[in-house]
Image (cartoon, grey):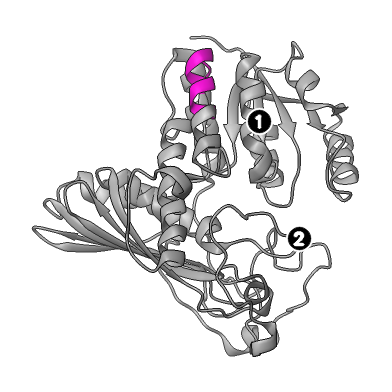
């Protein structure tokens, strides 16, 4: 067994990514060494000083020009933390240079972009991982319950994943966009689309437990935050998924607001089988605690650089959010690199994952169920 250390290049610290959250695990892992930060010249004004700040903090070079940076000899792995709209191009560059890929959540903004990444990876033979979805307690506990046979054959499931962030406020007609945005518009300066951002975790759980999804029905537009209503972009939504065997999974996801839940938002799955049912709480121990003074006297100040609390936790969170999943994902990646194996969630899984999310948005706009695979304009 090799004890080789793998050099990792951090491509961008976009606020639309979890790059900064990955850094502690990269620094602590004995087989990983951060060798640089990189980005292109044509980036948002806030990004250049942020990238430089992280490079200085990590005491590594900050490279301008992604293509040249990924080709450097000391780079074995490229961690892609750019906006969704730029990830496909960067992934293809890195795969073409023979570099392994650590990608935060999405590999492209639409199906053509996702498909070309999968093709590039297959041509190059590099190892890929998307670490954010399946190394957490909710997935691990659900899989143990299903695989242990306690439920019999799994027949259906429901998943609630909501983040207790943001301050819901009344929304006037003047603040509300007249129409719900279709899929494909992901980048905003002040918000994230929450079915995409939060619902993605629930979809990944269903993917792990069900056969391939063949039909999606979505509902959205029930706004709690004026910031989202103004864009016509979801802050909450539901999806109903049907798999190839006819099993049904339902999902609710989005933002529930500060102080709405004692552990920062529900993270739970209800599993239904032929022999029984089970409830899994991903924020074990499963305690819902609401202390009036912690809620009333909580500090609800929002940092000017993080207006929708993308990178800050809820002030009333009282319990642990679970085991650190990034270290488990890094161990999985390193093991795959050592042995030539396959991590648990790769670009192939990510392509199917994005297709389900795109179908959900298409369903909301069209107000009808959407069949998979997506074709033509539905996939764009």
The residue positioned 29% from the left and 54% from the top of the image is 215
344 or 316, nearer to the observer:
344
Magenta run includes residue 69: no
Q: Main secondary structure of the magenta part?
A: helix
The residue positioned 57% from the left and 73% from the top of the image is 179
The residue positioned 70% from the left and 82% from the top of the image is 298
The image's mark for residue 128 is: none
SS assignment at label 2 = loop
Q: Position of residue 127 (x, y in %)?
A: 51, 21
The residue positioned 59% from the left and 71% from the top of the image is 317
Structural crowding at the residue carrying mark 1, measured as other residues with C-alpha within 10 Å and reported as few (<14), some (14–19) or many (≥20):
some
SS assignment at label 1 = helix
Q: Position of residue 218 (x, y in %)?
A: 39, 65
Residue 347 in view, yes or no: yes
Residue 331 drawn above or below residue 237 = above
Residue 34 drawn above or below residue 366 = above
Read off the residue under disc 2. Answer: 189
Read off the residue under disc 1. Answer: 89
Q: Is residue 38 left or right of residue 267?
A: right
């Amino acid at each position: 067994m090799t004890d080789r250390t793998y050099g990792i290049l951090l491509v961008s610290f976009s606020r639309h990514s979890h790059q900064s959250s990955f850094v502690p695990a990269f620094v602590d892992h004995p087989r990983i060494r951060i060798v640089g930060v990189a980005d292109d010249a044509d980036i948002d004004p806030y990004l250049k000083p942020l990238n430089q700040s992280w490079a200085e903090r990590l005491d590594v070079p900050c490279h301008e020009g992604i293509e040249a940076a990924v080709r450097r000899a000391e780079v074995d792995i490229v961690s892609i933390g750019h906006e969704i709209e730029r990830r496909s191009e960067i992934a293809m560059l890195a795969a073409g240079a023979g570099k392994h890929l650590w990608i935060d959540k999405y590999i492209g903004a639409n199906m053509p972009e996702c498909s070309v990444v999968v093709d590039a990876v297959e041509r190059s033979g590099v190892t890929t991982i998307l670490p954010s979805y399946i190394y957490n307690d909710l997935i691990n506990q659900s899989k143990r319950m299903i695989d242990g046979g306690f439920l019999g054959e799994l027949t259906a499931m429901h998943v609630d994943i909501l983040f207790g962030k943001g301050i819901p406020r009344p929304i006037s007609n003047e603040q509300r966009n007249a129409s719900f945005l279709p899929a494909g518009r992901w980048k905003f300066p002040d918000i994230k689309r929450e079915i995409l951002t939060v619902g993605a975790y629930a979809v990944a759980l269903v993917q792990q437990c069900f056969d391939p999804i063949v039909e999606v029905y979505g509902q959205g537009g029930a706004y709690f935050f004026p910031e989202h209503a103004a864009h016509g972009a979801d802050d909450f939504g539901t999806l109903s998924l049907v798999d190839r065997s006819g099993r049904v999974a339902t999902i609710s996801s989005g933002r529930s607001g500060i102080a709405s839940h004692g552990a920062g938002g529900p993270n739970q799955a209800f599993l239904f089988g032929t022999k029984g049912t089970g409830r899994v709480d991903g924020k074990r121990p499963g305690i819902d605690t609401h202390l009036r003074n912690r809620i009333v006297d909580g500090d609800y100040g929002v940092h000017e650089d993080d207006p929708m609390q993308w990178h800050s936790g809820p002030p009333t969170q009282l319990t642990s959010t679970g085991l650190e999943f990034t270290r488990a994902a890094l161990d999985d990646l390193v093991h795959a690199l050592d042995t030539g194996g396959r991590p648990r969630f790769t670009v192939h899984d990510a392509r199917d994952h994005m297709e389900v999310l795109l179908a959900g948005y298409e369903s909301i706009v069209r107000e009808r169920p959407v069949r998979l695979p997506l074709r033509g304009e539905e996939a764009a």
